[in-house]
Image (cartoon, helix red, strand yellow):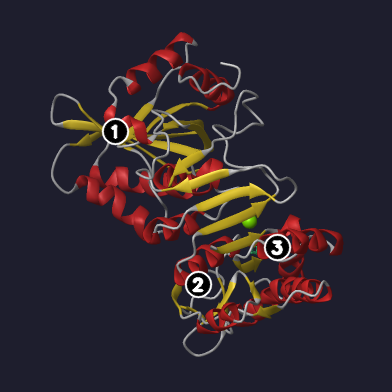
Amino acid sequence: MALIVQKYGGTSVANLDRIQNVAKRIAKTYDKGHAVVVILSAMAGITDNLIDMAGNISQTPDKRELDVLLATGEQTTSALLAMTLKSMNYPAQSLLGHQAEVLTDQCHGNARILDIRAERIQELLQDRHIVVVAGFQGCDPNGNITTLGRGGSDTSAVAIAAALKADVCEIYTDVDGVYTADPNICPQARKLDAVSYDEMLNMASLGAKVLQIRSVGFAKKYNIPVHVRSSFSEEEGTMVVDENSGMERLVVSGVTHDKNQARITLKKVPDIPGIAAEIFTPVANAGIVVDMIIQNTRAEGQTDLTFTVPRADFKQALEMQTAIAKKIQAEDVFGDEKIAKVSVIGVGMKDHSGVASKMFNALAKESINIMMISTSEIRISCVIEEKYTELAVRVLHSAFGLDKNG
Ligand code: ASP
Ligand code: MG
């Protein structure tokens, strides 16, 4: 007998028929003798509707009240599911975030979970109840309702699984798992059986559509196996687990791409202490996240410095740098918005050499120029011209043996 946490996303509870379908799935798990805790999202589209409604009242609706409003989406589905289970003669009970004792900080709209006492859940489980918890919501130390940011019910599920020391956290969604690349641009992409926490964190661009990335950090910290799978089929999905749990350690398990990038170059910057700090401090103070940074040394005590920022922040960052360049007497500043970052990710890289050169060769064969390179223990990223993104993903996918027919 296991303790299983199941989370159902918005499309899985989008209407009463689907809630019925979810209830049947839960009943099946319960009938096997398992203890079941269910975490729910709001019905698909509901959170968006609520946000729109609030937006009609004010462009900056009061954050506390917005959370009270948004939490109703999950309150609705939790009640409906518990009701459905009870009508099928299963002992179920719904709990809202505060009743499940999900304690968060006070950051309305993007709160972080501080603690989950989960005593009430434990008691209900002991009485063989199916416990249905409204995801996405918690309460702060003053008892105010908070929400955990878009997609936050994934984090609710993993955090509750951690608090209960559950055997597994199953995330039911409308895709059947995590893929080796975005299937929309790479027809050869296939579903992965398993992926490690760190790979998943690095695959944010692939994985974020399936899992709120913050939930993966939680799963890693408390070593909770997460099973991402479809609520519309019986097929196994993708296990997100510790890399030493016996999963296959692929050298490359995924190829990601990110078009949300822009780069800025400062040319002939004086090569003296303090300059990098001058360049990046204002950027950081403006809350702009810098991803890659490259500095080349020229002769004559000068360097060129290039870095990337999210495309939405490009204009602001470029204006800042134009002013800074004058101040530090750099020769020129220019930027480029038509770039993309492609990355190969895999834990197996730790014990393999030649991965970078294989990547560079595969891109070279297609005459794709590499503008910037960065590496970490389990990832190699290249910045290329945006127009080559799709081609780059496909050739890398095939070069690293990931193609389903390969
Ligand atoms: N309903 C919330 C949202 O749409 C939370 C979730 O679905 O995870 O973002
Ligand atoms: Mg989601």
- Quadrant assignment for the C terminus: top right
Mark 2 is on which residue type? Ala
**What is the distance, in whole Å, between disc 3 and disc 1 at their CAs?**
40 Å
- Residue 216 location, x and y as percent? 46, 54
**277 on left or right of 333:** left
Vertical comparison of 129 with 177: above or below? below
Vertical comparison of 401 with 349: above or below? above
Q: Nearer the viewer, residue 264 or 333?
A: 264
Mark 3 is on which residue type? Ile
According to the picture, the residue beneath numbered tag 3 turns out to be 26
SS at badge 3 = helix
Judge: label 3 CB < 8 Å from ligand 1. no
SS at badge 2 = loop
Q: Nearer the viewer, mark 3 or mark 2?
A: 3
Q: Earlier in the sequence, mark 3 or mark 1?
A: 3
Q: Mark 2 near mark 1, Cβ–Cβ under 8 Å?
A: no
Crowdedness near tag 2: few (<14), some (14–19) or many (≥20) residues, C-alpha within 10 Å: many
**288 on left or right of 67:** left
Q: Is residue 113 visible?
A: yes
Q: Give the image quarter of residue 296.
A: top left
Numbered tag placed on residue 111 in the rendering: 2
**What is the distance, in whole Å, between disc 2 and disc 1 at their CAs?**
35 Å
Numbered tag placed on residue 350 in the rendering: 1
- Residue 69 location, x and y as percent? 70, 78
